[in-house]
Image: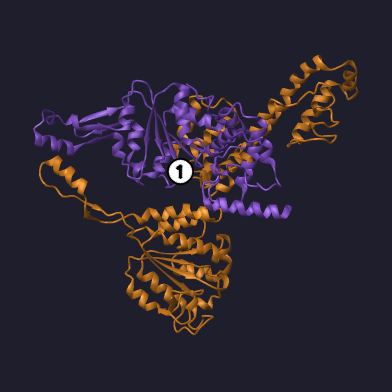
């Protein structure tokens, strides 16, 4: 029945499933919406959308698919006040006013004109001489030419508003493609927590042991996983240069991440990873750490997160001696490749918007080296990044 | 059986449709929204409006799905067996019914509120999939299947602390209670404090929405806080004019403690008020 609508939702990347579609049809069958388009909108919204961040997308698709229905609805609106006004006309209009109506071409003409203007006009209007509204000299609208104040569309107003409900796009700021703010970071980091609570069964489960012993009648020791942050993370952080506009954003992410892991080490680099990194940005030239030492020290089950915009000259990645700050014997690409070879879980979080990536060759090179595991710094990007990180190969 | 809101609860059109769909199709209804927008109250009001018993299951971080079905009190049984009690022979004496079981066995069709489902472990919703879907479960200790006599209306609230699994979401209706606009808010206030002077309401609503719009505020005041504040204003018999005073010394709304729950927010607001006063002065 609404297959087209369903497919449109699917192609807009909304996570809708056949099961939800069938639920919607079932609800239609049981007659839950009152054969009103806005009822159907509310019903389909609550059936098909399960996350407030998708509400805006849904509104857009709905508006797009059911565009034809709006004009249908507008027709109805223009029709209802006609009868309504007619009855009022007989009650309230004086002979003089009736004559005035005649001078405008008779009642039918007037109504036709009204219909036309209703269609043209979308917003509430006050004053002026053409539009339907309040207090104007237009023959249509409330407090207009009738001393009793005929109000057009008072009751139907609701209808009119409801047609536009999805066009208002109230949930716009809940869309997940929006850039990350402080609140959003918190939500994103709850996703980090998801894989921070895993572990092997290696501690004594006292209540479990008692329960099992009581159940079975002999001493039965059971073990349980400790609730701890088993996940170990190395964070490499690009500072200086083109990253400066993003530094505040990244710092927020960074400070928020700090509380989530016990085993987290952070290092700084500039533009691309080379033979040394540093831990304290103030003493970056004096206290360097050899990258080899890091590769040797941290075992391969560490998860690697790079944060950087990967915007630089391609030479800085592919050529030895390409670094803008010092002479590097080995190209940045080789260092990145070493990381990728040793550690299974490597992602690169890029604060630059996804759509700009293709215009920066260095971004593409880096993305290629880390086998397309670069993610934008949006909620969706972080989410996908975290999924990638928690994957076991 | 249709829910149309109650005299104490203003339900918007979209919320009504979602609730009625959930009741008719016997599927769980998942409610999300800002804290204090009336998620939990909704279940209570549906129960009152439709005259159905309400069973509430509050979820904590330690709650397990099994606890909603039943618990087998093995420790008491172990102790009883030492004492040679007679009832130790029947395992049924040690099975404690959970809230889900309770709602399945209710004589009338009940409302089951699963409150703050996101507080529990990540796997919690997955563990309840079958039980909520088929409304039945199996008790291993006694070898019996508990089946719902009348499928309860299940209302689930979430504060968005954890993402819920897709399989679980697919089985639910979903409604996001967005923050009420001014006209809805006036209706809500009217329902709670019918005698309040309308001028006081409009003035305080203005202050309230201004407060919500203050940039950088940590915890935006919500509906329940507004209602508390109004109650205080009425108690203290604050005049509407006092709320309107824009350039007097008391720029901070009276009794603001009911609205701002965070000392940083109070500081921020005081600072902003101070700046505004300096500009005006």
Q: Estimate how packed mark 1 is, as few (under 14), some (14 to 19) or many (20 or more) residues with alpha carbons within 10 Å.
A: some
- Residue at x 31% of width, y 55% of height: A198
Residue B12 percent location from the top left of the image: 56, 31
Residue B78 location in percent, x, y? 14, 38
Relative side of A149 to B169, left or right: right
Q: Position of residue B121 (x, y in %)?
A: 35, 46
Any part of residue B215 in sight = no
Q: Is residue A63 visible?
A: yes
Residue pictured at 56% horizontal, 38% vertical: B229
**Front in this rendered view, residue A176 or A334:** A176
Question: In the rendered image, which residue does mark 1 sit on?
Answer: B159
Using the image as rendered, state which of residue A393 and residue B129 is in the foreground: B129
Instruction: Give B70 or A176, whichever is nearer the viewer.
Output: B70
Residue A176 against residue A149 in the figure, above or below: below
Query: Quick one: which chain is purple?
Result: B
User: What is the number of callouts on the image?
Assistant: 1
Q: Quadrant of residue B51?
A: top left
Vertical placement of residue A307 versus A170, above or below: below
Identity of the residue drawn at 48% across and 32% down: A24
Task: Name the chain under label 1.
Answer: B
Asked if residue B265 lies left or right of residue B140, the reply is right
Label the orange chain with its letter.
A
**B48, above or below A46, in the image:** above
Judge left or right: residue B180 versus residue A264.
right
A331 relative to B214 in the view: left or right: left
Residue drawn at (71%, 23%), measured in percent from left and top?
A80
The x and y percentages for residue A189 are 44, 55
Question: Helix or strand or loop: what does disc 1 sit on?
Answer: loop
């Amino acid at each position: 029945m609404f297959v087209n609508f369903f497919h449109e939702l699917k192609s807009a990347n909304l996570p809708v499933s056949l099961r939800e579609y069938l639920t919607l049809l079932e609800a239609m069958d049981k007659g839950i919406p009152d054969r009103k388009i806005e009822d159907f909108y509310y019903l389909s919204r609550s059936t098909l959308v399960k996350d407030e961040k998708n509400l805006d997308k849904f509104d857009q698709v709905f508006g797009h698919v059911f565009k034809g229905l709006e004009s249908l609805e507008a027709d109805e609106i223009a029709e209802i006040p006609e009868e309504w006004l007619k009855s009022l006309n007989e009650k309230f209009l004086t002979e003089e006013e009736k004559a005035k109506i005649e001078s405008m071409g008779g009642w039918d003409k007037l109504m036709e004109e009204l219909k036309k203007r209703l269609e043209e006009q979308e917003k509430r209007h006050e004053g002026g001489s053409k539009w339907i509204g309040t207090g104007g000299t237009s023959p249509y609208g409330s407090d207009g030419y009738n001393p009793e104040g005929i109000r057009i569309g008072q009751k139907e107003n609701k209808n009119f508003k409801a047609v536009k409900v999805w066009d208002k796009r109230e949930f716009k700021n809940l869309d997940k493609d929006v850039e990350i703010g402080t609140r959003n970071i918190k939500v994103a980091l709850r996703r980090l927590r998801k894989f921070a609570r895993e572990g092997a069964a290696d501690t004594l489960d006292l209540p479990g042991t008692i329960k099992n012993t009581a159940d079975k009648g002999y001493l039965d020791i059971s073990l349980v996983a400790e609730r701890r942050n088993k996940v170990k993370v190395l964070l490499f952080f690009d500072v200086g240069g083109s990253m400066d506009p993003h530094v505040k954003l990244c710092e927020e992410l960074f400070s928020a991440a700090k509380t989530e892991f016990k085993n987290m080490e952070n290092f700084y680099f500039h533009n691309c990873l080379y033979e040394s990194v540093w831990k304290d940005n103030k003493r970056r030239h004096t206290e360097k750490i050899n990258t080899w030492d890091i590769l040797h020290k941290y075992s391969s089950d560490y998860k690697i997160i790079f944060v950087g915009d990967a915007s630089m000259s391609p030479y800085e990645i592919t050529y030895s001696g390409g670094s803008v700050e010092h002479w590097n014997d080995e190209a940045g690409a080789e260092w990145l490749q070493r990381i990728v070879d040793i550690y299974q879980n490597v992602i690169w979080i890029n604060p630059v918007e996804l759509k700009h990536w293709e215009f920066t060759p260095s971004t593409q090179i880096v993305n290629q080296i880390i086998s397309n595991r670069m993610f934008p710094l949006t909620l969706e990007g972080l989410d996908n990044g975290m999924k990638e990180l928690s994957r076991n190969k | 059986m249709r829910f149309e809101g109650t005299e104490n609860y203003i339900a918007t059109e979209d919320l009504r449709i979602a609730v009625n769909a959930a009741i008719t199709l016997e599927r769980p209804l998942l409610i999300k929204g800002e804290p204090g927008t009336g998620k939990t109250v909704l279940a209570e009001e549906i129960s009152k409006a439709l005259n159905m018993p309400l069973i509430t299951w509050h979820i904590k971080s330690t709650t397990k799905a099994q606890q909603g079905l039943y618990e087998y009190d093995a420790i008491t049984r172990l102790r009883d067996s030492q004492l040679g009690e007679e009832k130790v022979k029947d395992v049924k004496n040690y099975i404690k019914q959970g809230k889900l079981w309770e709602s399945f066995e209710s004589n009338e069709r009940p409302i089951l509120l699963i409150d703050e489902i996101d507080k529990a472990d990540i796997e919690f919703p997955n563990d309840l999939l079958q039980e909520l879907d088929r409304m039945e479960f199996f008790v291993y200790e006694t070898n019996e299947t508990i089946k719902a006599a009348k499928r309860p209306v299940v209302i689930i609230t979430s504060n968005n602390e954890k993402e819920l699994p897709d399989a679980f979401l697919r089985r639910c209706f979903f409604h996001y209670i967005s923050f009420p606009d001014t006209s809805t808010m006036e209706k809500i206030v009217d329902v709670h404090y019918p005698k309040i002077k309308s001028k006081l309401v409009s003035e305080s609503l203005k202050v309230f929405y201004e407060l919500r719009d203050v940039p950088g505020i940590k915890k935006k005041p919500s509906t329940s806080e507004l209602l508390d504040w109004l109650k205080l204003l009425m108690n203290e018999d604050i005049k509407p004019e006092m709320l309107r005073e824009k350039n007097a010394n008391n720029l901070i709304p009276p009794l603001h403690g009911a609205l701002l729950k965070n000392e940083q927010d109070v500081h921020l607001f005081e600072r902003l008020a101070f700046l505004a006063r300096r500009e005006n002065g």
